[in-house]
Amino acid sequence: MSKQRFHDHAEWLRGDGPGHDVVLSSRVRLARNFAGFNFPGRASQDDQARVMELAKEHITGLGLDPGVVWVDLEALDAEERTVLVERHLISKQHAKGKGARGVAVSNPDERLSIMINEEDHLRIQVIRSGVALAEAFDQIDSVDDRLESRIDYAFSPRFGYLTACPTNVGTGIRVSVMLHLPALKHMGEMDKVRKAAKAMGLAVRGFYGEGSDAVGDFYQLSNQTTLGRSERDLMVGFERDIVPKVVEYERMARKNLLERRRAFLEDRVWRALGILRNARLMKADEAMEHLSQVRLGVVSGVLDGSGLTLPEVQQLLLFVQPAHLQKARHRQMDQAERRLERARLLREAMGPSA
């Protein structure tokens, strides 16, 4: 994928917005389907192609954003599709799928992306930096309304919007935040967070959502059911009641570490920074773990004076990923070469050893 197509600084990595010390990003996603067509998993190749044509016509014809880029996934190689996954613009399922499928992305901010022929015909997503669910909802609601003025959605007066997965039936909405919770992990409190989330009908997933691990203490927290509640009710309850509590818990855990276990915290942070500044080989998961500790050091003040900023650290969360690393180095690499180049990239970015 060319550098002209996607910018290197997606909004969700900016490191600002309310609660940005704990919440990397807020995301609202809607599942929608065209009436009169089978869901993608049961659709014929001709139907998939027709949905692609209709989606492209309606999305590009609305002028949703002057910088919207249309991408045909069948025209991309595996690495280019993985770049989109790493940027949270498409899912792993979408990248590995078969048949006609695509994505429309607002460029350069990458706030808006619309997957075509993933599990549903349309998966509309808006992502913002920090706690910004209300803003994300307002944008996606406007996009959805404008699309619905041209598209006949699959809808039931009794059940609401019809989707491939029963858990999405109703509003079709998923509301989520990407959280960084290293202090809670250090204090041994993550099991309590998971149990509390489950009791409230929420899902706790890893960095890349469903089916991924929570590498580096990064977690996605999202609603699990959509039936019987309005989109705005789900969003408001999530943003006003749930997310602030999790943010407060992480900040309290960070404060306890600083006051009661400062030497432990400083050792973890500075040890991680030392490894990043000096290592000669680095796996992706290992890099995420160390960057997580460095990020904790930045937001807690432990690394004040180090010259590191939150946006710089968060950009590295992206550029240590395999496809982005190869994109940065302008060549294909095997796993051994990636470990070598990843360590070199991190040494360059982190500055000289203290």
Image (tube, grey):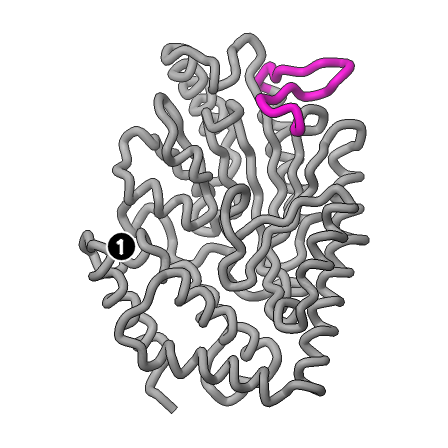
Q: Nearer the viewer, residue 319 or 3?
A: 319
Q: Main secondary structure of the magenta part?
A: loop
Q: Quadrant of the N terminus?
A: top left
Expressed as whole percent of the image width and height from the top left, the position of residue 319 reads 36, 61
Expressed as whole percent of the image width and height from the top left, the position of residue 219 reads 59, 55
**Residue at left offset 69%, top offset 53%:** 194
**Residue at left offset 41%, top offset 61%:** 285
Expressed as whole percent of the image width and height from the top left, the position of residue 229 reads 80, 32
Look at the picture and state if 172 lies above or below 78. Answer: above
Looking at the rendered structure, the secondary structure element under dot 1 is helix
Residue 36 picture quarter: top right
Look at the picture and state if 213 lies above or below 187. Answer: above
**Residue at left offset 62%, top offset 61%:** 23
User: In the picture provided, is 179 more to the left or to the right than 89?
Assistant: right
In the picture as drawn, the residue positioned furthest to the top comes out as 36
- Residue 261 is at least partly visible in this image: yes
User: In the picture provided, is 29 more to the left or to the right than 342?
Assistant: right
Residue 9 picture quarter: bottom left
Is 164 one of the magenta-colored residues? yes
Look at the picture and state if 229 lies above or below 354. Answer: above
Expressed as whole percent of the image width and height from the top left, the position of residue 35 reads 58, 12
Q: Which residues are magenta?
A: 150-168
Q: Quadrant of the C terminus?
A: bottom left
Q: Which residue is mark 1?
A: 327
- Residue 316 is at least partly visible in this image: no
User: In the picture provided, is 17 more to the left or to the right than 324?
Assistant: right
Amino acid type for the residue under numbered disc 1:
Lys
Is 352 one of the magenta-colored residues? no
